[in-house]
């Protein structure tokens, strides 16, 4: 009896190759991506536009509130480092990789407001449905409907949670709506690059106690060392 063909694995490999190839083709090789010096005081200006085809022109901060699964795809598959040698990394790629580290640290450690915690809710099919913010030890104001149930309580929210449940694609779409509701009070509101960047650099909204890379600017020698280690891991050294 022959083994079944793993279409999901093959499609993922094709996606990594396609995204990394197009990224290498269109990423800037000069300093055109640098922030405007006159606006350097504003935090959002440090978030650069990306050149991956799916979200070309958006910043990583914007993508988090639109398609959070894409952030984890870029991070876990090391797309930024594909088809490159260590000495071939441009300043843009180093800076973008650093920003991805920053965003990843923050997206995994979103803090509930003081005296509150998050409730993780799944639907009757076992797919992530939403998260709720309630007083510590409390219950939702309204009863859950349609077979939904609470699976866990947590003080820190990890945006990657939908990947732990069934049908993660729909789960991440719901997570994006919940994030917009949490940070901007309206689930259907899509923040601008400035708004998304400003919210994500508000340290009070995250628990960054043991994060080693959580600031966009400046990129320090320690940050470069972290990027170098991730590069070596991505090429299997």
Image (cartoon, grey):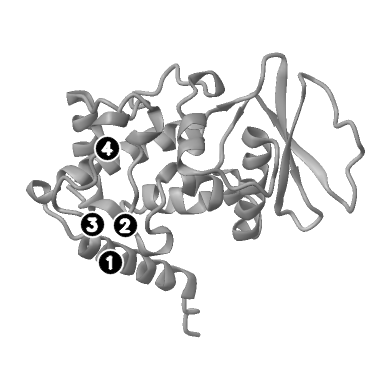
Q: Position of residue 117 (x, y in %)?
A: 70, 24
Real-space Cα distance between discs 3 and 4?
16 Å
**Tags 2 and 3 in contact by the CB under 8 Å rule?**
yes
Real-space Cα distance between discs 2 and 3?
6 Å
Circle on res. 22: 1
Q: Which residue is mark 4?
A: 35
Q: Which residue is mark 2?
A: 51
Extreme-front residue of the structure = 38
Q: Residues within 10 Å of mark 4 (few under 14, many from 20)?
A: some
- Of helix, strand and loop, which one carries label 3? loop
- Tag nearer the camera, 2 or 1: 2
- Of helix, strand and loop, which one carries label 1? helix
Label whose residue precedes the other's in the sequence (3 or 4): 3
Q: Position of residue 8 (x, y in %)?
A: 48, 70
Q: Position of residue 180 (x, y in %)?
A: 63, 41
Image point (19%, 30%), residue name: 225
- Tag nearer the camera, 4 or 2: 4
Circle on res. 27: 3
């Amino acid at each position: 009896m022959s083994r079944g063909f793993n279409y999901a694995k093959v499609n993922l490999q094709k996606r990594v190759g396609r995204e990394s190839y197009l990224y290498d083709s269109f990423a800037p090789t000069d300093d055109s991506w640098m922030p405007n010096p006159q606006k350097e005081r504003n935090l959002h200006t440090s978030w650069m536009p990306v050149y991956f085809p799916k979200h070309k022109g958006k910043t990583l901060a914007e993508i988090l509130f639109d398609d959070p699964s894409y952030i984890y795809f870029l991070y876990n598959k090391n797309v930024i480092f594909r088809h490159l040698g260590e000495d071939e990394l441009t300043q843009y790629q180093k800076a973008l990789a650093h920003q991805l580290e920053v965003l990843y640290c923050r997206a995994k450690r979103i803090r509930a407001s003081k005296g509150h915690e998050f409730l993780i809710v799944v639907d009757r099919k076992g797919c992530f449905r939403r998260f709720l913010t309630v007083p510590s030890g409390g219950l939702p104001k309204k009863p859950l409907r349609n077979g939904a149930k609470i699976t866990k309580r947590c003080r820190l929210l990890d945006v990657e949670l939908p990947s732990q449940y069934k049908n993660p694609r729909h789960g991440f779409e719901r997570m994006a709506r919940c994030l917009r509701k949490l940070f901007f009070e309206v689930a259907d509101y899509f923040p601008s690059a400035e708004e998304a960047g400003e919210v994500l650099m508000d340290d009070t909204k995250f628990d960054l106690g043991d994060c080693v890379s959580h600031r966009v600017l400046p990129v320090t020698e320690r940050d470069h060392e972290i990027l170098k280690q991730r590069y070596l891991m991505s090429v299997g050294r």
